[in-house]
Image (cartoon, helix red, strand yellow):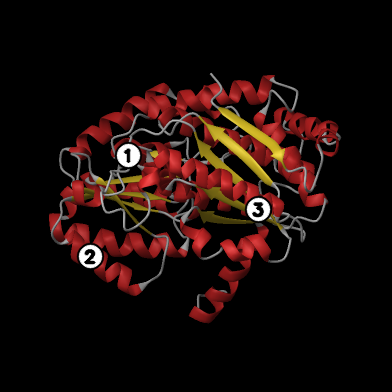
């Protein structure tokens, strides 16, 4: 059932096993706050039981809407920012071909808007939409967040001009608050199909709600398997009480132990390019949850072996302020061996017959050895493979560990007061009434 393991053997250059184990009482207390709902931010704990409580009727309606839109869409534009798009993008990019934009496998290709204010981006997007049949999912609890609100206004105008107002209504799905907010009001007035972001689930924890499930299903992936993976990991996280049996508790304990021993930066490392958006989603999850009260590890990410030829020098010999969390995938989906070459001018015939996974694994092992010897502790998170089931497990594992880790750190993991600072300044500079 559990496909996720956390290995801390390569952390002993910074903390020993006893130091990690000594955090068990604090980690168990943090877990208890999470499950009892008596900690800070307890009005945003809906994600804890979400995999078990998902509404089957809603899922059936969502699948019907996906089937309807697939019949008329080459593209789907997903409009959202932060947690409103990162979770879906993480799953989609982990599962689809690296060349899906060219291959077009029969499912709509998912493109994203509302996560940037780049003018050239929207100019190029509108030129693309001129020539493609498309539909839109707009995701926002309030409907007034600047980036997605601007994007929706632009894309909606294009959609209505291209298809007419009545047909455009049939191509838009709104995912928003159940009762209030600008997007809710627009959806009611226009008659868009609408799905609810639960009040008690914050954006960065929302991938297993319609926020993530609808785009993932639209891309052609199995959301039932995704949810089953999350359900099975939830059972492990809730029932197991030891660090050895509970990977989320172990991860929370080791990162807090390292933080208390002077580590300030946590880098997520992956050997798989299709996991780059797992790192982007993880960075928001942990950065927004723990980065407050002048506390918390700074989340960063690199890809190996790519970034070893750029960032590798700093990691090996720079200031000793970082840890690495390396995602290891045991069983790849495909096998590509190195072919022979009689001239062997490149000198790599010693690799003939080896798969790229074998070579990549040796690169990962060599990287761990080098970085550990250079004073960088490495946590390994190992999963059997990458598919919908294991991604569901990874999602719930990281979410649960985030709640436990945040409480162990001594912060409210479920608010984000610092996010509003830039908005107030931006509104003032733009001349928004009241600012």
Q: SS class of the residue under badge 3? A: helix
Q: SS class of the residue under badge 2? A: helix
Q: Is residue 262 left or right of residue 198?
A: right
Q: Which labelled disc corresponds to residue 93?
A: none
Cβ atoms under marks 1 and 3 closer than 8 Å:
no
Residue that badge 1 annotates = 337
Of callouts 1 and 2, the N-terminal one = 2
Marks 1 and 2 sit apart, C-alpha to C-alpha, by: 42 Å
Mark in the foreground, 1 or 3:
1
Q: Is residue 256 left or right of residue 187?
A: right
Of callouts 1 and 3, the N-terminal one = 1
The image position of residue 420, as x and y in percent, is 61, 64
Marks 2 and 3 sit apart, C-alpha to C-alpha, by: 46 Å
Q: Quadrant of residue 64?
A: top left
Name above or below for residue 332 compared with residue 55: below
The image position of residue 350, as x and y in percent, is 40, 45
The image position of residue 157, as x and y in percent, is 24, 63
Q: Quadrant of residue 244?
A: top right
Marks 1 and 3 sit apart, C-alpha to C-alpha, by: 28 Å
Neighbours of disc 3 within 10 Å: few (<14), some (14-19), many (20+)? many
Q: SS class of the residue under badge 1? A: loop
Q: Which labelled disc corresponds to residue 126?
A: 2
Residue that badge 3 annotates = 371
Of callouts 2 and 3, the N-terminal one = 2
Neighbours of disc 2 within 10 Å: few (<14), some (14-19), many (20+)? some
Mark in the foreground, 1 or 2:
1
Q: Is residue 43 left or right of residue 363?
A: right
Neighbours of disc 1 within 10 Å: few (<14), some (14-19), many (20+)? some
Name above or below for residue 366 compared with residue 226: below
């Amino acid at each position: 059932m559990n496909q996720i393991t956390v290995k801390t053997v390569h952390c002993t250059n910074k903390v020993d096993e006893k130091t990690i184990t000594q955090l068990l009482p604090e980690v168990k207390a943090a877990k208890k706050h999470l499950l009892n709902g008596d900690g800070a931010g307890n009005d945003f704990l809906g994600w804890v039981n979400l995999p078990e409580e998902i509404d089957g009727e809603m899922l059936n309606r969502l699948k019907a809407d996906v089937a309807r839109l697939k019949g008329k869409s080459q593209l789907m534009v997903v409009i959202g920012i932060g947690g409103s798009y990162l979770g879906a993008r993480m799953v989609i990019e982990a599962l689809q071909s690296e060349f899906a934009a060219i291959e077009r496998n029969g499912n709509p290709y998912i493109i994203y808007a509302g996560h940037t204010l780049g003018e050239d981006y929207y100019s190029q997007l509108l030129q693309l939409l001129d020539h493609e049949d498309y539909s839109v999912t707009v995701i926002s609890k309030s409907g007034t967040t600047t980036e997605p609100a601007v994007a929706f206004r632009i894309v909606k105008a294009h959609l209505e001009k291209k298809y007419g107002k009545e047909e455009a209504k049939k191509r838009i799905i709104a995912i928003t608050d159940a009762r209030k907010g600008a997007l809710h009001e627009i959806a009611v007035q226009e008659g868009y199909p609408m799905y609810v972001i639960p009040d008690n689930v914050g954006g960065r924890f929302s991938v297993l709600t319609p926020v993530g499930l609808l785009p993932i299903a639209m891309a052609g992936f199995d959301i039932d398997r995704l949810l089953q993976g999350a359900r099975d990991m939830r059972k492990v996280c809730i029932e197991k009480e030891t660090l050895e049996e509970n990977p989320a508790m172990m991860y929370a304990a080791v990162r807090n132990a390292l933080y208390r021993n002077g580590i300030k930066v946590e880098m997520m490392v992956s050997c798989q390019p299709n996991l780059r958006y797992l790192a982007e989603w993880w960075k928001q999850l942990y950065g927004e949850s723990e980065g407050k009260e002048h506390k918390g590890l700074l989340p960063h990410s690199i890809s190996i072996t790519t970034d070893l030829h750029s960032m590798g020098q700093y990691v090996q010999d720079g200031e000793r302020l970082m840890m690495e969390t390396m995602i290891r995938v045991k069983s790849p989906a495909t096998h590509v061996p190195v072919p022979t070459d009689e001239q062997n001018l490149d000198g790599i015939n010693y690799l003939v017959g080896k798969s790229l996974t074998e070579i990549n694994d040796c690169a990962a092992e060599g990287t761990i050895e080098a970085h550990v010897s250079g004073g960088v502790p490495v946590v390994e998170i190992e999963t059997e493979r990458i598919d919908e089931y294991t991604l569901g497990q990874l999602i719930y594992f990281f979410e649960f560990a985030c709640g436990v880790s945040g409480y162990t750190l001594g912060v409210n993991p479920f608010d984000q007061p610092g996010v509003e600072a830039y908005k107030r300044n931006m509104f003032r500079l733009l001349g928004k009434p009241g600012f």
